[in-house]
Amino acid sequence: MATVDCTGLTTREINEAIRRLIQAGEKEIAILNPRARHNLAVALLEPVRLIFEGSVGYYCAGMADGPHVEVHGSAGWGLAECMMAGTVVVDGQAGNGAAASIRGGTVVVKGDAAARAGIAMKGGLLLVQGSVGYMAGFMMQRGTIVVCGDAGEALADSMYEGRVFVGGWIAELGNDAVVEAPTEEERRFLTASLDQFGLAGPRDVWKKVVAGRRLWNFDKKEFEVWKEAL
């Protein structure tokens, strides 16, 4: 396994070192002493395995398309934002906007995720073993969020499509969000997803949150839709 020691290097130098190793054909790279630097491993398009031995800052693995990224620590804001494909696994906590606008792939947070987790998701899967803050799933368009713990206020506010599964307590549903019972197929999916990453979850007590579709209905005029929603 190749290594990059971040000691004394700038963020640009760290990313350049990672890219040189990828171009040289390395498939596994350990990044030592990242010390919560921002913008690490952004826009990587290769199926490489990156292991960060320590916490990372903002926007780690943003705009990725294919890599497998492990963070043996916590992550700042914007973890894996706009990811197209790949896997990002964080052992600790994640800041605001984890998995925001992802279009594919899987983001796993083994601790808690802060506010706005999974906002504007257009596909993919976000798994949070702990709890999430307010406005998780805001304006989701596709994809799945799984929260084994509790969810904060305005959960799934104004979502279009997608599913949010919560194993714990929901502080407040967002506008147009409704709760349904998961299907047996969805329960099997939840069990398989947790088992795949070794996560502990409720297993039996799940709530599924989806769009009520009262705020958008393209068969009606806008005024009629808002009048019904109020």
Image (cartoon, rainbow, N blue to C red):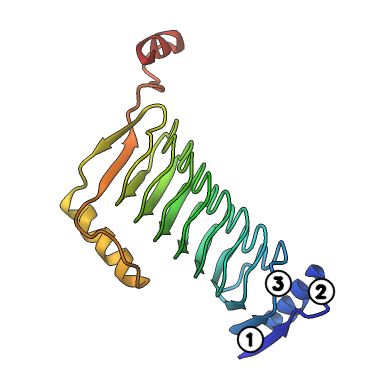
Task: Classify residue 110 as left or right of residue 13.
Answer: left
Gap in angstroms between the C-alphas marked 1 and 2: 18 Å
For the residue marked with disc 1, what is the amino acid?
Answer: Glu
Label drawn at residue 26? 1
| Image coords of residue 19 (percent x, y) | 72, 76
Q: Is residue 173 visible?
A: yes
Residue beneath the point at 57% across and 66% down? 74
Residue beneath the point at 32% across and 48% down? 165
Gap in angstroms between the C-alphas marked 2 and 3: 14 Å
Crowd rating for badge 1 (residues with CA inside 10 Å; few <14, some 14–19, many 20+): some
Q: Earlier in the sequence, mark 1 or mark 2?
A: 2
Q: Earlier in the sequence, mark 2 or mark 3?
A: 2
Residue beneath the point at 67% across and 82% down? 32
Task: Classify residue 68 as left or right of residue 169.
Answer: right
Label drawn at residue 187? none
Label drawn at residue 35? 3
Along the line of sight, the residue nearer the viewer: 202 or 16: 202
Label drawn at residue 13? 2
Taking the view exactly as shown, the residue that stands out farthest to the left is 184
- Give the quadrant of residue 2: bottom right
The mark closer to the camera, 1 or 3, is: 3
> From the viewer's perspective, is residue 60 above or below residue 206?
below
Along the line of sight, the residue nearer the viewer: 182 or 93: 93
Task: Classify residue 140 as left or right of residue 83.
Answer: left
For the residue marked with disc 2, what is the amino acid?
Answer: Glu
